[in-house]
Image (cartoon, grey):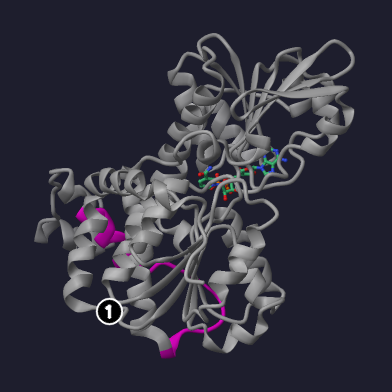
Amino acid sequence: MEYKVKDMSMADEGHKLIQWAEEHMPVLMDIRKDFEKEKPLDGVAISCCLHVTKETAVLVKTLSAGGAEVALAGSNPLSTNDAVAAALADDGIHVYAWRENHDEYYWCVDRVADYRPAITMDDGGDLVTMIHTKRRDLLENVIAGTEETTTGVNRQRAMASQGKLEYPVIAVNDAMTKHFFDNRYGTGQSTIDGILRATSVLLAGKNFIVAGYGWCGRGLAMRARGMGANVIVCEIDEIKALEAAMDGFRVMPMKEAAKIGDIFVTVTGNKHVIDRNAVDLMKDGAIIANSGHFDNEINVPYIEGAAVKSEEVRENVMEYWMGDGRKLYVLAEGRLVNLAAAEGHPSEVMDMSFANQALVARWIIEKEKNLESRVYTVPEEIDREVARRKLSSMNVNIDTLTEEQRKYMEDWKEGT
Ligand SMILES: NC(=O)c1ccc[n+]([C@@H]2O[C@H](COP(=O)([O-])OP(=O)(O)OC[C@H]3O[C@@H](n4cnc5c(N)ncnc54)[C@H](O)[C@@H]3O)[C@@H](O)[C@H]2O)c1
């Protein structure tokens, strides 16, 4: 079996979506032209565990243009766009993904592992973990992996610190041209997009609780404020909390925010950030969503257990009757709301994230023999190349240092 998707008759729709993304991803398309000529990934097996979106399709087709043999599974049960998956299968990519495949999710990851990857491309770390546990037979084939998101990088750093990481992983998430833009502006905009598509509520005047003021949380708080919401931030890190306060947001613990929030969004990468104590305090009508990688940021099983009745009242909106007269609404089962209820990040930011992925894949092949089993940051020259190419695509020119300035910056003797 070369692929498994929901419905091949959706392929035409998928091709149109991919074409739309290609038109908004100039950097990656430029890299694709280079790859077509140079074939830097000739014969390299790349197994990807990435959200199957139109933007991921542009990356996969770019890797393929570079000569790679690509297999693709989704990286979350609700994040696959079935039309895109069908179009990729139609293009000869080994896709194993469909929306709402919770039970089969790990089966799909296992299938892409079967292609015996030389490079793994992960978003969240499930493929890396699988290869280090139940598919250890594949370890000898892997040259290196790349990791797209904060949660995955955290997991792989934990593996490395316990001496359990058995191949090099390059933390694409940590590239500046990735998290400064994708996590902040991408998650900021697309999380709002997901909440609005699911609920169509007015944000102006609402108490909008953002749990986690990291890269994603900053972007989300900024965009929610832009829509007129009263944004309240919950944090556990004193520096991030201080930053949020000085950025002009109210900061308070979840147990206080829980009583006044109209809309709650978790973006922490942590577990049970909205737990039973917060749920019990929430107002009637509260809307609860998550945009962090895993679906355990909200204790949804507790809500399900405590509810006397539940009903899907709109697509991606589950209404829970709590027995005390309150109704609470959980979006997209507590999974990434921006991918489950909208289309994920806009193509323009994924252009940079996936340009890093493509250039890092080429770098891995060039450096193959010299990499150790640890977590690497993306080489600065790649990060800067992505920034230069993006600026150029936006027709933005910048200044360059004069010789006098360059010398001054390297000097320590000259004062006032
Ligand atoms: N939705 C998406 O498309 C998307 C995109 C990028 C990243 N992510 C995911 O979003 C999550 C956050 O990513 P990030 O890059 O912002 O990470 P980050 O490390 O920059 O920020 C996380 C923040 O959460 C805070 N935090 C941790 N536990 C908390 C708790 N119990 N209560 C309140 N705050 C808490 C941390 O102090 C930190 O400031 C990760 O799971 C990441 O993988 C999702």
Horizontal and vertical percent for residue 363?
Answer: 34, 76
Horizontal and vertical percent for residue 58?
Answer: 32, 56
- Name the residue that disc number 1 marks: 40
Q: Could you tell me if residue 223 is visible in this image?
A: yes
State the residue at coordinates (59%, 27%): 315
Horizontal and vertical percent for residue 233?
Answer: 62, 28
**With 310 as the anchor, is 42 left or right in this view?**
left
State the residue at coordinates (68%, 36%): 333
Identify whether 402 is placed above or below 347. Answer: below
Quarter location, residue 69: bottom left
For badge 1, the amino acid type reads Pro
Q: Tell me if the residue at label 1 has its CB under 8 Å from ligand 1.
A: no
The one of 30 and 380 positioned closer to us in this rendering? 30
**With 133 as the anchor, is 385 left or right in this view?**
left
The one of 148 and 99 positioned closer to us in this rendering? 99
Q: How many numbered marks have been drawn onto this rendered protein structure?
A: 1
Magenta span includes 81: no
Label 1 crowd (10 A; few <14 / some 14-19 / many >=20)? many
Q: Tell me the quadrant of ligand 1.
A: top right
Q: Could you tell me if residue 388 is visible in this image?
A: no
Q: Which residues are magenta?
A: 369-389
Quarter location, residue 89: bottom left
The one of 300 and 215 positioned closer to us in this rendering? 300
Horizontal and vertical percent for residue 142?
Answer: 52, 83
Magenta span includes 384: yes
State the residue at coordinates (37%, 40%): 346
State the residue at coordinates (23%, 71%): 35
Identify whether 38 is placed above or below 391. Answer: below
Residue at disc 1, secondary structure: loop
